[in-house]
Image (tube, rainbow, N blue to C red):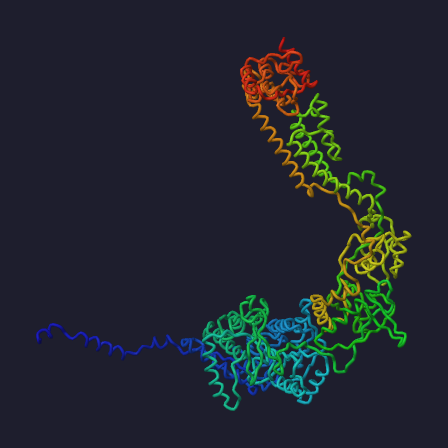
């Protein structure tokens, strides 16, 4: 053991000894490598006694502590130099000068109010010291006016769109802003008005008046202002004030009874962010920027609450609202920018401003990113205040997706959760009521109405009281719509006499009347002076012209009952049916035989005679009889339809408009009648119609007389008036050529009147129900009601093939089927003769076809029509070979010699003789003898001779002898 120890010295002890000696050697170079962090002075100007000031005094130091805890090796550390301005502009400016001159501040956080920020920003621009505000939200101060000013908060203008969306969502048409009359409040109102009025017409709201209160207003002054608002019509208020004034406003509203059912209050983010400090009444809707609920935010809020109570033990508990989040992110951004520039003395001016502007990170309030020197607009959350300053989230609003219960803009999440309004009401407030003064609405109605248009509107005078009572469709619709309003609307009619409707509209627009109820057409020009309700009656511009009878000018009227296609198809089927009958009958019926010209004439005569059921030919074949029966049925239907249509054309007056369309009216020279006190004269003149051809009338009787005596050739007016005119005078006139559409009839109100939206909604409800239809039937009758002379305008249209194609299909199929059956029968019966014709050697196909036709043209001697009880040609025994399909001598002769034509009228007589019996052909002698022997006891039946058969046999026998 001792020897082994001597061979291996203790190396571990040597290494330990060397390390101890090295630790004793001084190392000045390492100490110089990690110098202490540079100090960057940043000023903080707040109102220490205000809620926002107390929140900022806790939040900003905490944000800096958190930053350097996250970055312990930071090369530059922010040192806060806090000053209390006590809400005074001069004190804030003095503090800013002291910070920039004596304390060497590189940047300033604050000041707290917008007025202070405006002064400090001007001073900082001269000194080139960046000012980062976390609470100056007024649009009056912006980076565009002060280059070194940066807003690390949202501008008040950003929430105007959310308020306008709320007004549109709840259907509010009047909004009264209650605001603090300084730069903080006054500069916000124009943005609110623009947002309310720059929406669609259906969602537009107006600001009838405003309530501006000084920032230092007393409780009595605020109470007096609330009582003035309570006496007005509007019940929707938007409060935009600082916390101290907001508390006075809500307290005075409670005393004035304005936190009861029917009222609606909306608080801007300056109030909603401090609900725990202000504690407003229940039922208020608040708007505040949305901050994502991250774990980091929850941790900071928990630590912030403890630190706030430690810093301000005498203050009430507060929550970390949007001001605290903005202050935290602003301090973090300044510390981050100072760290990126390093401990150099150049951390001043433009470089620090650019570093702050380019700083981006995920802050507590969301993504911190300055665009144009201002914080980007995130989503707003919509809350509902409940007891003890708590809130209930109703939904969210973004400029892209609008109002939604959840973020993301999904269609199924549109809208808001149910709201609990003041007095725990769940009924959405209308937003305004009838003023407590009880003044009735002065509704202007025309005093001179033509009796011809009584259903539209009329005035009746009570003889006992000499008072005028308005009635008619227009009046009844207006009164029905008023009854559907959710509130009482007292009104009285004011007669205005005979006044042009354009003048009446202008008087309503100027405030002489509260409304005008009449058959006023909605036009673009009139809508410049007044607001119209939705149209309660649609209208178009059309014209009424006299009717003239066209019967005397139609010499070829007998062709009109059927269209050309039906005429053509009928003629084709007539020829086809005649051909089928001839094909079936000509072999067995003497009436269908003879020279070709005679057969063609018989075919055509037979076909045409069926049209009048005058065909005299006696049909022998059941096939042809079936064809004719079906065809006669079709002819019967065609004839009946033709007769009925022609009768109506000849007996019923065929009335046609004297002027067919508006173009014909324009190009013609006829005068045009128009109604007085309407927009038609201006409309016709504007369209370029010659004014010299316009004639104005007031009464419907005047229009009637002018049309009858030819003074005017047409009436151009709106369809409701023409409809009434035609109900009274429909004998000789008709409506044609709808020229243009109009806006319809509507009720006129002054611009911005809240009654427009409510009455429009009532008109829609009336239209969707049976109410509007009942009123129309009461005053205009049913649409199908009218004078009997309206039937005189009947016109009979020509019948087309489309109405009868089924009949032609039946007769065509029947004829084709019978023709096929006859052809098949013929082929089977004459198969041997046909085979001889087909197999004839050295004959062209044309000659073979001619042989086939000659065979088809021969009489069918086997038919009962050619049989007789006397002896003679064509006995049963003599025809047995032919019936069996054997080739007849005539066919053999045809095959052996040149074929003959039907046109030469030569026929084979080898089968028939008169005085002596010709011997039968050898090929059939045996068969004939067998037939005669087998039928010796039967009565012999012979074919009766006829002239055609005699001539056929003579010709054939003569050729055979040759």
Task: Locate residue 911, reporting x and y percent.
Answer: 62, 15
Look at the image and tell me in which quarter the C terminus lies.
top right
As drawn, is 509 to the left or to the right of 931? right
Q: Which quadrant of the view contains residue 417?
A: bottom right
Question: Which residue in the rendered view is the most extreme toward the front?
Answer: 937
Q: Residue at x 46, y 82 (%)?
A: 302
Viewer can see residue 120:
no
Task: Locate residue 739, reporting x and y percent.
Answer: 78, 54
Task: Locate residue 733, reporting x and y percent.
Answer: 84, 53
Task: Locate residue 543, reporting x and y percent.
Answer: 81, 54
Question: Which residue in the rendered view is the most extreme toward the bottom?
Answer: 314
Above or below, comparing residue 529 to residue 218 in the picture: above
Q: Which quadrant of the view contains residue 225?
A: bottom right
Q: Which quadrant of the view contains residue 918?
A: top right
Look at the image and tell me in which quarter the N terminus lies.
bottom left
Query: Considering depth in this image, is 930 or 47 the residue closer to the camera?
Result: 930
As drawn, is 40 to the left or to the right of 683? left
Query: Considering depth in this image, is 345 or 427 the residue closer to the camera?
Result: 427
Query: Considering depth in this image, is 56 or 927 the residue closer to the camera?
Result: 927
As drawn, is 97 to the left or to the right of 361? right
Viewer can see residue 782:
yes
Count of marks, rendered view: 0
Question: Which residue in the rendered view is the most extreme toward the top?
Answer: 962
């Amino acid at each position: 053991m001792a020897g082994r120890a001597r061979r291996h010295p203790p190396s571990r002890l040597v290494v330990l000894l060397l390390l101890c000696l090295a630790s004793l050697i001084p190392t000045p170079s390492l100490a110089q490598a990690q110098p202490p962090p540079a100090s960057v002075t940043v000023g903080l100007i707040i109102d220490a006694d205000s809620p926002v000031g107390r929140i900022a005094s806790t939040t900003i130091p905490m944000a800096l502590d958190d930053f350097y805890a996250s970055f312990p090796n930071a090369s530059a550390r922010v040192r806060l130099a806090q000053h209390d301005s006590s809400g005074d502009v001069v004190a804030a400016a003095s503090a800013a000068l002291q910070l920039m001159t004596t304390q060497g501040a590189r940047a300033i956080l604050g000041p707290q109010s917008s007025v202070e920020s405006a002064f400090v920003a001007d001073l900082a621009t001269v000194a080139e010291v960046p000012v980062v505000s976390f609470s100056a939200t007024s649009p009056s101060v912006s980076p565009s006016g002060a280059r070194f000013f940066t807003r690390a908060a949202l501008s008040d203008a950003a929430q105007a769109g959310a308020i306008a969306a709320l007004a549109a969502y709840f259907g509010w048409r009047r909004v009264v802003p209650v605001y603090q009359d300084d730069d903080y409040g006054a500069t916000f109102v124009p943005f609110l008005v623009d947002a309310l009025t720059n929406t669609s017409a259906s969602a537009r709201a107006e600001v009838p008046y405003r309530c501006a209160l000084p920032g230092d207003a007393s409780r009595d002054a605020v109470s007096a202002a609330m009582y003035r608002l309570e006496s007005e019509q509007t019940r929707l208020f938007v409060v935009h004030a600082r916390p101290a004034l907001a508390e006075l406003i809500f307290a005075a509203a409670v005393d004035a009874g304005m936190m009861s059912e029917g009222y609606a209050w909306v608080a801007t983010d300056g109030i909603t962010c401090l609900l725990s400090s202000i504690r407003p009444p229940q039922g208020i809707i608040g708007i505040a920027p949305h901050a994502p609920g991250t774990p980091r935010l929850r941790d900071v809020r928990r630590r912030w609450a403890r630190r706030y109570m430690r810093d301000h033990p005498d203050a009430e508990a507060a929550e970390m609202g949007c001001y605290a989040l903005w202050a935290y992110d602003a301090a973090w951004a300044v510390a981050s920018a100072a760290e990126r520039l390093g401990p150099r003395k150049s951390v001043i001016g433009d470089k620090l401003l650019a570093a702050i502007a380019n700083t981006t990170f995920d802050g507590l309030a969301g993504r911190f990113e300055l665009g144009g020197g201002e914080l980007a607009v995130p989503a707003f959350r919509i809350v509902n205040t409940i007891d003890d300053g708590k809130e209930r989230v109703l939904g969210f609003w973004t400029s892209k997706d609008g109002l939604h219960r959840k973020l993301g803009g999904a269609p199924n999440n549109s809208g808001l959760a149910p709201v609990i309004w003041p007095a725990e009401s769940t009924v959405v407030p209308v937003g305004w009521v009838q003023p407590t003064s009880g003044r009735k609405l002065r509704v202007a109605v025309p005093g001179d109405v033509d009796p011809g248009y009584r259903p539209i509107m009329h005035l009746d005078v009570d003889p006992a009281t000499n008072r005028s009572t308005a009635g008619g469709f227009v009046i009844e619709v207006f009164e029905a719509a008023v009854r559907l309003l959710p509130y009482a609307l007292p009104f009285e009619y004011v007669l205005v006499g005979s006044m042009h409707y354009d003048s009446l509209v202008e008087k309503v627009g100027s405030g002489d009347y509260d409304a005008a109820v009449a058959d006023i057409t909605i036009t673009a020009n009139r809508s410049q002076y007044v607001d119209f309700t939705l149209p309660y009656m649609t209208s178009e511009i059309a014209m009424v012209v006299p009717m003239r009878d066209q019967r005397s000018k139609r010499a070829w009227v007998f062709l009109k009952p059927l269209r050309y296609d039906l005429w053509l198809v009928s003629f084709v089927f007539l020829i086809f049916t005649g051909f089928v009958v001839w094909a079936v009958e000509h072999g067995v019926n003497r009436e269908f035989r003879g020279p070709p010209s005679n057969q063609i004439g018989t075919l055509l005569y037979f076909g045409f005679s069926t049209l009048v059921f005058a065909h005299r030919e006696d049909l022998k074949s059941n096939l042809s009889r079936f064809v004719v029966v079906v065809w006669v049925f079709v002819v019967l239907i065609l004839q009946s339809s033709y007769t009925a249509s022609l009768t109506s054309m000849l007996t019923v007056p065929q009335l046609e408009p004297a002027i067919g369309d508006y173009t014909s009216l324009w190009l013609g020279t006829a005068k045009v009648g128009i109604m007085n006190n309407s927009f038609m004269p201006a409309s016709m003149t504007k369209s370029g119609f010659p004014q010299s051809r316009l004639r104005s009338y007031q009464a419907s009787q005047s229009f009637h007389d002018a049309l009858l005596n030819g003074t005017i050739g047409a009436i151009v007016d709106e369809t409701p008036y023409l409809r009434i005119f035609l109900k009274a005078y429909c004998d000789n006139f008709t409506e044609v050529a709808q020229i243009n559409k109009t806006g319809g009839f509507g009720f006129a109100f002054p611009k911005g009147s809240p009654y427009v939206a409510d009455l429009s909604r009532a008109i829609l409800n009336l239209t969707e129900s049976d109410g509007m239809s009942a009123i129309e039937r009461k005053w205009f009758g049913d649409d199908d009601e009218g004078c009997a002379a309206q039937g005189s305008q009947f016109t009979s249209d020509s019948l087309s093939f489309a109405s009868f194609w089924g009949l032609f299909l039946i007769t065509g199929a029947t004829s084709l089927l019978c023709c096929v059956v006859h052809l098949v029968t013929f082929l089977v019966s004459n198969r041997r003769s046909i085979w001889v014709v087909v197999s004839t050697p050295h004959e062209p196909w044309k000659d073979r076809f001619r042989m086939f036709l000659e065979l088809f043209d021969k009489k069918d001697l086997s038919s009962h029509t050619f049989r007789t009880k006397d002896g003679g040609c064509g006995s049963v025994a003599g025809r047995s070979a032919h019936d069996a399909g054997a080739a007849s001598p005539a066919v053999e002769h045809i095959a052996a010699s040149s074929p003959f034509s039907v046109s030469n009228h030569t026929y084979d007589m080898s089968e028939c003789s008169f005085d002596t019996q010709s011997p039968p052909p050898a090929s059939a002698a045996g068969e004939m003898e067998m037939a005669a022997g087998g039928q010796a006891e039967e009565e012999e039946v012979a074919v009766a001779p006829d002239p055609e058969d005699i001539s056929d046999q003579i010709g054939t026998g003569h050729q055979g002898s040759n």
